[in-house]
Amino acid sequence: MNLNKRLVIIGGGPAGNAAATSAARKGVEVIVVEREIVGGAAHLLDCVPSKTMIATGGAMSFTESLSGMGLSNRDAEIDVNALTDRIEGIKNRLSNDMTSLLQSQGVTIIRGSARLLNANTVHVDASDGTTHQIQADDILISTGTRPRIPQFAQPDGDRILTTRDCYPPRIFPESVTIIGSGVTGVEFAHMFASFGSKVTLVVSRQQVLPGKDPEVAAVLEENFLSRGVRLYKGARATNIERTEHGVRVVCDDGRVSETTHAVLAIGSIPNTEDLGLEEVGIEMDGGYIVINRHCQSSVEHIYAAGDVSGKLPLSSVASMQGKKVAEQVVGGPRGPHRHLDYDKAASAIFTEPEIADVGLAEAEAFASGRKIRVTKVPFATTAKALINNDSRGFVKIISDPATGEVLGGSIVGRHAAELISVIALAVTANLKVSDIEESLLVHPALAEALSEAAE
């Protein structure tokens, strides 16, 4: 099938790659322009390295609990070079695999930077020194984001770090102050604590993970405190300065944290500068591209997907957006279609214990006055948790008391990121708690807590 259409994609991350592979299979000529790394900088230079280091830290923590499983403890030591090689190996393999997949489907990849000359022309400054002007029927902007740097901080890549400066690891800090207690901040706090660093976490609100279920946040805070992490609650960093032996972080309430390093984990900003977006009439909001439910910008044949769209900054969301863009490019979906519902996206936080949630949150429901049924089952009631010597956490399911429809849920504990998929499927497919309860699940397994919570 040849549609005689050309789709130019600026940014080869999860959104761009999903759009490229899906559109190419439908007969569209696809050109991807990527200036950093095929697979996406935020994905391969942020997410993959951090999760790899967290996995290694988790392995170290596991060795510390061996005595509880009838084994003698064995102290694990960090091999920084081996860990660096592991991170680089995973990153390169994923990037190479994606490059090969794109090329096998006839997608043209141009390394370089791009900007719009007009609504149908993309100018490319290629990394080999050549320039190109490409005519396009449709254009997708999927250029991602980068770490946000506050005015009071000047990262130097040595002592004052952005999250991206932390990999590959050259050393593990003796002590570190992490500014920001959202998803990234708590993951970094967990990661550095796992490697033996003394961690101070600056928490601007009265709980870590603002906006998340307070009960979930409380479990994580308890774990942090048990591991010696200092929590500066209700404090905002106002200044960071280098000292003779490290850094000094000053907070607005007068508290000061002096550590060897500081890490900024206070969000991200979209990579939408110098793309010529506003010149061609694309509506923006705080640097993000405003899109409709089809991922279309205010210029009909120009789309945005991934983090630059201002929606949930999740790779899974970006990939699904990319697929939806491909559908629109070929004239709309063929057959049954479901619009993206961002409120039903599952997310996970890779701390110890893991945290995952999906759908309606308990606090959100109460705030809106919506009637809900909340059931909670601790993992300690399952045989598998006792076998694993790890009974921390719980499963919580939120449902409609009148219909039994599953509206949301949260999980805290081992493998939460995997287990949340059951609740996510129920939320997306409008299943009832009885559908989960009557499923014949494996025994012994942590998933048994799901059916118990559904009773």
Image (tube, grey):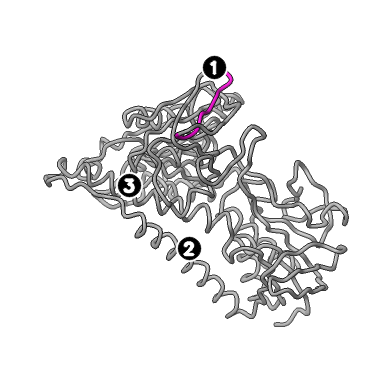
Query: Under tag 1, what secondary structure?
Result: loop
What number is the disc on residue 91? 2
Rendered location of residue 66, percent (x, y): 18, 45
Query: Under tag 2, what secondary structure?
Result: helix
Q: Point out the image quarter for the N terminus.
A: bottom right
What number is the disc on residue 254? 1
Disc 1 crowd, CA 10 A, few/some/many (<14, 14-19, 20+): few
88, above or below 240, in the image:
below
Query: Under tag 3, what secondary structure?
Result: helix
Q: Quadrant of residue 143?
A: bottom right
Distance, label 3 to label 1, CA atoms, is 34 Å
Q: Amino acid at mark 3?
A: Gly
| First-in-chain label (3 vs 2) | 3
Seen at 69% across and 78% down, the residue is 27
Distance, label 1 to label 2, CA atoms, is 41 Å
What number is the disc on residue 204? none
Numbered disc in front, either 3 or 1:
1
Of the pair 289 and 272, the residue shown nearer to us:
272
Rendered location of residue 437, percent (x, y): 37, 44
Disc 2 crowd, CA 10 A, few/some/many (<14, 14-19, 20+): many
Q: Amino acid at mark 2?
A: Lys
Q: Which residues are magenta?
A: 245-254
| First-in-chain label (3 vs 1) | 3
189, above or below 72, in the image:
above
Q: Residue furthest front?
A: 244
Find out whether the residues at labels 3 and 1 contact each other: C-beta distance under 8 Å: no
Per the image, the residue denoted by label 3 is 58
